[in-house]
Amino acid sequence: MQIAVASGKGGTGKTLLSTCLMKVLADYNPVLIDADVEEPNAGLVLKQQVLETTVVSRLVPEINPQTCNLCGKCAQICKFNALVVLIDKVLVFNELCHSCGACAYLCPQAAIKEKDHPIGVIEEAHLPGYGTLLTGRLTVGEAQSPPLIKATKNKKTEAGLRIIDCPPGTTCAMIEAIRDSDYCLLVTEPTPFGLHDLELSLEAVGLLDIPGGLIINRWQGEEQELAALSSRTGFPILARIPFSSKLAQSYMQGRDPLEAMPSLRNILTDIISQIKEALS
Ligand code: SF4
Ligand code: SF4
């Protein structure tokens, strides 16, 4: 089973939930995939010791100046303006290239071959008693995160259960992270920003036809608008995690949130039961 933990807005408590979920589900030998590759921090929370690092690359074009006749066809084909043909050479902008391969396929002179361009790494850590943590870490300056998210999700592990800590927002990165999940948990907070971004996320999850439910974090009793959104969209509210300054402080100090708020374990166990029921 694969459970995605997503949110529209950043800072709603996605990583806190993902890492605690991993601990609560330790009997299933889970793998937690940190797909927030631009700023992964599950490893900081879990105090990971990286065992293995794998470099991830994507293909970008390389022009052979001996055979290129500067016809300009490749630049016309490229929808992402990653190629510019000058009077004496072709410039390739790797950061704009989407690795579609069209230019290499259609070059009349067969002057383009594809070469590997490193975009980041996958770090693998084993957390005794909890399972495995796979962290995708995008190289600073790289713009294309979906290929790294895909590679991190595809890395082979012996896991009974997969939990994906997704990037915030509703861009291609979030879509790639939640894709193929059996269930999507959407963590939100009862604020206007939280509500606005949650609506966008629900739309994305709905388009991919993934069943899901809401978790209201930092709940302080106010939930009218979230409840209305839940009944309008059909995504149930699975849990309310009360606001707790003790939890926030202990999390910031790197301590175990399940110790700061012991009731969190029961809340998460109940969420799992609801997911199982929804999928049965
Ligand atoms: S299509 Fe091929 S031959 Fe034409 S400019 Fe591009 S690389 Fe050169
Ligand atoms: S591989 Fe695709 S995106 Fe990249 S330069 Fe070629 S045509 Fe453009």
Image (spheres, rainbow, N blue to C red):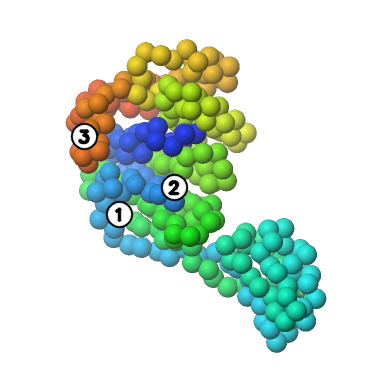
First in sequence: mark 3 vs mark 1: 1
Label disc, if present, on residue 250 of the rendered structure: 3
User: Left or right of 44: which side holds 255?
Assistant: left
Kindly tell me whether residue 205 is visible in this rendering: yes
The quarter of the picture where the N terminus appears is: top left
Q: Secondary structure at mark 2?
A: loop
Labels 3, 1: front one: 3
Amino acid type shown at disc 1: Ala
Residue drawn where x is 40% and y is 64% of the image: 54
Q: Which residue is mark 2?
A: 35
Residue drawn where x is 72% and y is 62% of the image: 78
Q: Are marks 1 and 2 in contact (CB under 8 Å)?
A: no
Labels 3, 2: front one: 3
User: Left or right of 97: which side holds 198?
Assistant: left
Kindly tell me whether residue 1 is visible in this rendering: no
Label disc, if present, on residue 125 of the rendered structure: 1
Q: Secondary structure at mark 1?
A: strand
Figure check: 96 above or below 41: below
In the picture, residue 260 is in which quadrant? Answer: top left
Ligand 1 positioned in quadrant: bottom right
Of residues 120 and 183, the one nearer the viewer is 120
